[in-house]
Image: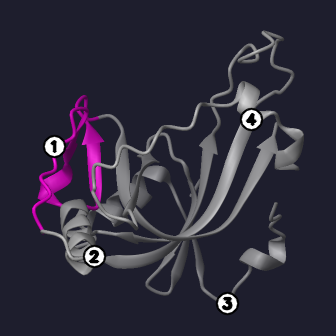
Amino acid sequence: MTTLSNAAVTSAVPRVTVTPVELAQRVAQVKASTIVSVVILTAVKMLKKHRDTKQACPYGEITKRTVMTAMVGTDYSNAVDNRRVKEGGEADVEVAPHQWADHVDGKPAIVTNKAGDQSYANLRVLNVSSVEYLQDGAAVDADSLDLDGYGPKKPADSGRQMVDDAVIWRTVKLAPLCSFESMRANGQELVVGVA
């Protein structure tokens, strides 16, 4: 397991504290594919009872902290078509619209749910630098967690892209509930907090 120290995330890049709504507004302004460095906090949905033994879950709140390089403002179908052509296939992927969300102003960078009260960023994952698990806010060794027994089941690969090297896509909460801890792009690090 990779553990992040404060030194690993310290840099000379100016840090700006933004609210989740301000971060969503900035992401909505992205007009072209932009490479960003992001830190995402995701609540791990643990089962109340072990999958096999039925023992009660001994863990409190488990959070996964992922540091990655991603591309925001890119189009999923274009990314898959480009990958298909690179691998000698046809550029004919047809992507159905989200059943639960709508694109903001037709831009691929951001979507909102049908109620319009939660926004999300669409990210094409390029590289995952590190993954760290937190139990009730404190870093823990992933091997000490029985994620196979209490954690979510891993989905089977659907093979819908029909490529060897799949395009990894994540839709991450922006506002008002935010999964981002920080986003670094265009010479600034946007840190989500109370502005």
Q: Which residue is mark 2?
A: 87
In the displayed structure image, the side of residue 171 where residue 73 appears, left or right:
left
Residue type at mark 4? Leu
Q: What kind of element bears circle 4?
A: helix
Q: Visible in this render: residue 176? A: yes
Compared to 49, does 115 lie above or below? Answer: below
Please tell me how crowded label 1 is: few (under 14), some (14-19), or many (20+) other residues with Cα within 10 Å.
few
Q: Visible in this render: residue 193? A: no
Q: Is residue 113 magenta?
A: yes
Q: Which residue is mark 1?
A: 97
Q: Nearer the viewer, mark 1 or mark 4?
A: 4
In the displayed structure image, the side of residue 163 where residue 6 appears, left or right:
right
Pointer 1 or 2: first along the chain: 2
Compared to 20, does 112 lie above or below? Answer: above
Marks 4 and 3, how far apart in space? 37 Å
Please tell me how crowded label 4 is: few (under 14), some (14-19), or many (20+) other residues with Cα within 10 Å.
some
Please tell me how crowded label 2 is: few (under 14), some (14-19), or many (20+) other residues with Cα within 10 Å.
few
Q: Residue at x 88, y 50 (%)?
A: 141
Q: Nearer the viewer, mark 3 or mark 1?
A: 1
Residue type at mark 2? Glu
Marks 1 and 4, how far apart in space? 32 Å
Pointer 3 or 1: first along the chain: 3
- Residue 185 picture location, percent across and down: 46, 79
Q: Is residue 140 magenta?
A: no
In the displayed structure image, the side of residue 58 where residue 51 appears, left or right:
left
Q: Nearer the viewer, mark 2 or mark 3?
A: 2
